[in-house]
Image (cartoon, helix red, strand yellow):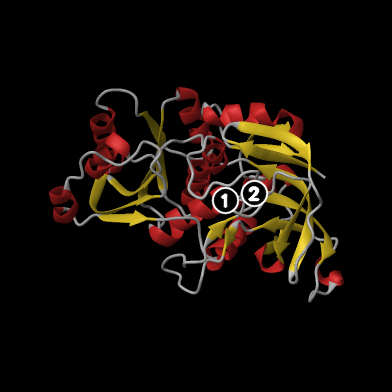
Amino acid sequence: MRAIQLTAVNQLEVRDVPDPVPAAGEVVVKISAAALNHRDVWIKLGQYAGLKFPCIPGSDGVGEVVEAGAELEPGEWVGRRVIINPSFGWGLSEAAQGADFSILGLPRNGTLAEKIAVPVEQLSLAPAHLSDEEAAALPLAGLTAWRAVMTRAQVKGGERVLIGGIGGGTALFALQFAVAAGAEVWVTSSSAEKIARARALGARGGFDYTRPGWAEAAAKEVAEEAGGLFDVIIDSAGGPGFEALIDLAAPGGRIAFFGATRGNPPVLPMRKVFWRQLSLLGTTMGSPADWAAMLATVTRQQIHPVVSEVFPFERAAEAFALMERGGQFGKIVMKP
C-alpha cells in the first residue's frame, strides 16, 4: 500500500509499505480521507517526545472496514463506514488519562496510509451527514475542543467565551461547540479575514492579538457590548500572551488550555488568579465518554467541520508546509 512516511527529521516520503495485518480484536480500515494536525508537523520537525523513524503519522481518519482479525465477527464491522478515535488507552478515570495513554500516529502507525489496523473499540460509525473529508477532519481536533469547552470549562448558554488563534482546526471546533451550547463567542487572530470568517460561523466579534494594547481594547469592547469580561477563555498558545488572558477573565472565570506553542508564560500573576477566583484548567485530548458525547452533538446539531484544503498523498509536502506557516482556515485533509 501507499503511505506518507517520515524516515528522519524533516524527511517526508510517499512510498510503498507492507499492508497492515490485524491482531486479535483489530480491524483493517481502508482510509478514504485523513487529516493533518500540528502534532504531525511537530513530529516531522523532531519537536515531539518519543520520536521513532520510520513512522507513518496521522491521527485523523475515516474509511471502510475491509478485514476483521481474530475474535471478531467479520459481519459485524466489515463494510461499515467508520471514524477512528485517536485517543488510545485513556484509562478508567474521567479526570485524566492514565499511564497507558497514547495518540494514534506515534508510536503506532497512523492514518496517512491507504490502510490502517486499529482495535475495534476505537471505531464509531461515521456521522451520516458528513462527507469523508468532513469526517476525517473531526477526530483529534474535535475531541480536544470538546473536552476543553464542554468537559473542563463546562460552557453554558449565555456565557461569554473567548477563543484564541481562530483558523486552526481545534479553535474552530471550540467555536462551533460553544455556539451550539448557546454561548456568546469572541475570537482572536492575526488575520482580519479569519476573524470575518469566524463571524460567519457564529462568533460575535474578534480581536487582532498582534496589535499593541489589544487586550485592553477587547476588555473595553466586551464590557460595553455584553456587560462584563469573559466567563471562559480557550487557549493553546501560552507564552507571553497568557498574562493578558488573566486580565480578560471575569471573576470566577475559567481558562482552559491544551497547548503551549509560544512556550511557558514568563509571568503568572497569582494574586489576580486567587483574588478573582479564577480556574486554570489544563486539558488533553479526551476520554471515550468525551468522544461519544462529541459525536452525539455533532450528529444532533448537524455540525459540519470546516475543511480548509484537500490534498492527495502525492502533495504531502505542500500540505505540511501549509500547516507549518499557519495558512489554513480549518482542517487540512489528505486523500490516498
Where, quadrant-wise, is the N terminus in this rendering? Answer: top right
* Residue 218 in sight from this viewpoint: yes
Give the CA separation, mark 1 to mark 2: 6 Å
Mark 1 — residue? 140
| The image quarter in which residue 85 lies | bottom right
Question: In front here: 257 or 193?
Answer: 257
Q: Is residue 210 left or right of residue 91?
A: left
Which residue is drawn at the image coordinates 60% and 36% (left, top)? 8
- The location of residue 176, given as percent across then percent down, is 52, 46
Which residue is drawn at the image coordinates 59% and 27% (left, top)? 321
Which residue is drawn at the image coordinates 54% and 59% (left, top)? 102
Labels 1 & 2 near each other (Cβ < 8 A): yes
Q: Is residue 272 left or right of residue 43?
A: left
Mark 2 — residue? 60
Q: Is residue 22 left or right of residue 291?
A: right
Pick out the residue farthest to the bottom: 71
> Amino acid under label 2?
Asp
Q: Is residue 273 above or below residue 8?
A: below
- The location of residue 73, given as percent across then percent down, is 83, 74
> Regarding mark 1 in the picture, which secondary structure is present there?
helix
Mark number displayed over residue 67: none
* Residue 309 in sight from this viewpoint: no
> Regarding mark 2 in the picture, which secondary structure is present there?
strand
- The location of residue 159, given as percent across then percent down, is 36, 52
Which residue is drawn at the image coordinates 43% and 36% (left, top)? 165
Q: Is residue 168 above or below residue 180?
A: above
> Amino acid under label 1?
Leu
Question: In front here: 14 or 160?
Answer: 14
Where, quadrant-wise, is the C terminus in this rendering? Answer: top right
Q: Which class describes the residues within 10 Å of circle 1: few (<14), some (14-19), or many (20+)?
A: many
